[in-house]
Image (cartoon, helix red, strand yellow):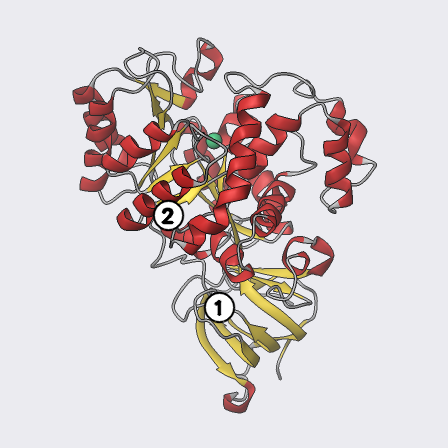
Amino acid sequence: MWSSDRETHVIIRNVTVIDGQRAAPIADAEVVVTDGRFSAIRTAADARPAASGAFVFDARGGYLVPGLWESHTHLGGLASFKPENERAKYISELLTEFLSGGVTSVVDLGGPLETELAARDYRSRATDTAAGLFFAGPVFTGINGWPVLDDPERASIAYQTDNADTAYRRALELADQVDFIKCIYDGEPGAPDKLPLDALKAIVAAAHEKGRKVLVHVHERIDLEEAVASGADGIEHAFRPQDPRSTAEARDIAALLTETNTYYCPTLVTWEQIARNGEAGYLQTLVDDGFATPEDIPQITSRPIYGREFPRHSAQDARVRFDYAMRTLALMHDAGVKITAGSDVAMLMPSRPAALLRELQLLAKAGLPLPAVLAAGTRHSAEKIGQQTTTPGTITVGSVADALLLDADPYADIAHLVDRSHHVGTVRAGRPSWDENHPAS
Ligand SMILES: [Zn+2]
């Protein structure tokens, strides 16, 4: 029986460890977890007898990788469609669903602060049966800017400003309550719905004073360049190139991101969905690639968003961004860009974890080497929000023990990571989800 005592020792044997950091996997290893953190990772030759009362798990020759990260999603915003007293529970259920898809950490890039705080509190009571939650709270945007537009229902997910001084003060306050700060920097320069550049700079300065990272949503190449010049730590969304026929812009941007150590989250799944929304062939592709079943299709096509234009983002624009990112991400990776994995909206996906797994598959289709795909879905996503010490997205002694057990080598075929039939179970804060546990006597 599993005991939730604080003093717990878990030993996972007969496993190949891919720690998400070193080049070489550690074959036939033994992983020891003490009080929810990795305490030893050693080869079977160095194995020690299990302490009495330790829980010993046989991984049956599987592969243990760091738990996956969904590094760009919006749970708080979704929850606002639920009655207020059900929102925290709803988000907690989504976090449980994420864990069942191999995702141990979820990064919410914008939602109402009260909902996020309540959700984290609610979830902390079920820490080892749901994914961890990190959140931005409300995003900074211009007056009636994305994603508020002029819809009052969306007002709680953003802080609208056209003034650098008030933005600075608000960012200082917010930084004490959230894990990182998110800004929207999208729109015509000088238009009231675009965050002014001096406000963006002030927000970054305030966040950095408080030791918080800043992620910036961009659209055009110039947005990206100005966000980087303002000190952004991460860029969200593949930028739209001026000349999609040439890879020159991707090379320039890659040099800029590498030189400034800025993370890049292309959100391919979102552009693919917006570009192909309403196209029957798209849902068939999801079935063929193993991300949906034929039974999911009627449920997806009955959603109100199905076949409808996404606000502010045309299908044509999304197509350009998607195609260009798919063509240039490998060269950006080769140039040294740290790519992160986030799916953003899951409007046509059967589930949220499926959206993240699809994102990882698309990164592989774009030509990233498989270790780089894993880094995008683990370590880089943790680093992007400054979690490299406690929850670093690696299997490292001293860090929170979050991992995913696979039955086949994820460096041999991307399907071994993204096809859920290869997922044996997760380890969340030291607790394995698969059945075979028994205390060593
Ligand atoms: Zn987003």
Q: Quadrant of residue 157?
A: top left
Q: Sequence-wise, which precedes: disc 1 or disc 2?
A: 1
Q: Nearer the viewer, residue 151 or 331?
A: 331
Mark 2 residue element: helix
Residue in the image at 43% along x and 34% along y = 109
Mark 1 residue element: loop
| Direction from residue 258 to residue 374 in the image, left or right | right
Q: Which residue is mark 1?
A: 19
Q: Is residue 388 above or below residue 168?
A: below
- What amino acid type should be assigned to the residue bearing mark 1? Asp
Q: Nearer the viewer, residue 126 or 316?
A: 316
Q: Is residue 335 above or below residue 316?
A: below
Instruction: Give the number of the disc on residue 223.
Output: none
Quarter of the image with the C terminus in it: bottom right
> From where the camera sits, is residue 79 visible?
no
Q: Nearer the viewer, residue 132 or 187?
A: 187
Q: Is residue 334 above or below residue 173?
A: below
Badge 1, how many Cα within 10 Å: few under 14, some, many 20+?
Answer: many
Q: Which residue is mark 2?
A: 384
Q: Is mark 2 within 8 Å of ligand 1?
A: no
Q: Position of residue 346 (x, y in %)?
A: 61, 33
- What amino acid type should be assigned to the residue bearing mark 2? Lys
Q: Position of residue 81 (x, y in %)?
A: 57, 21
Residue in the image at 64% along x and 50% along y = 100
Badge 2, how many Cα within 10 Å: few under 14, some, many 20+?
Answer: many
- Gap between marks 1 and 2, in whole Å? 18 Å
The mark total stands at 2
Q: Position of residue 89 (x, y in %)?
A: 56, 35
